[in-house]
Amino acid sequence: MKVTFQGKEVEATEVDVLAKDEHFNTYQLSDGHVLMFEEVLTGVQRLEGITNPDGMPAYQFQSQKVIRVK
């Protein structure tokens, strides 16, 4: 598959995502409510032939925000 990375079209490979540990960040609001926030990965692609400065593969990802208010 082709994806856009830094303004260029590059080859990428879809990588399966298996949840290892997911949790909400929890915040107490001054009005007494509790805000719970989590970001969940929905897709990951490894960018072929591109590495970060320490030589590790570069990835592009999509995510979805999940918010709860109690």
Image: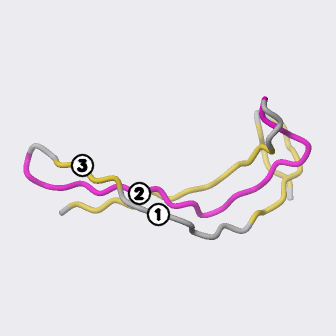
Q: Secondary structure at mark 3?
A: strand
Q: Would residue 35 be found to the left or right of residue 25 on screen?
A: left
Which label is found at residue 22? 1
Q: Would residue 33 be found to the left or right of residue 6 on screen?
A: left
Residues under labels 1 and 2: Cα distance?
8 Å
- Disc on the earlier residue, 3 or 1: 1
Is 37 situated above or below 6? below
- Marks 1 and 2: CB-CB under 8 Å? yes
Out of 68 and 26, give the one closest to the viewer.
26
Residue at horizontal 84 percent and vertical 59 percent from the top = 13
The part of the image, by quadrant, that contains residue 18 is bottom right
Q: Position of residue 38 (x, y in %)?
A: 41, 57
Residue at horizontal 47 percent and vertical 63 percent from the top = 22
The residue that label 3 is drawn on is 27
Q: Which residues are magenta?
A: 31-53
Query: Around disc 1, counting alpha carbons within 10 Å, would you say few (fewer than 14), some (14 to 19), or many (20 or more)?
Result: few
Out of 14 and 26, give the one closest to the viewer.
26
Q: Is residue 49 magenta?
A: yes
- Marks 2 and 3: CB-CB under 8 Å? no
- Quarter of the picture containing the N terminus is bottom right
Q: Identify residue type, mark 1.
A: Glu
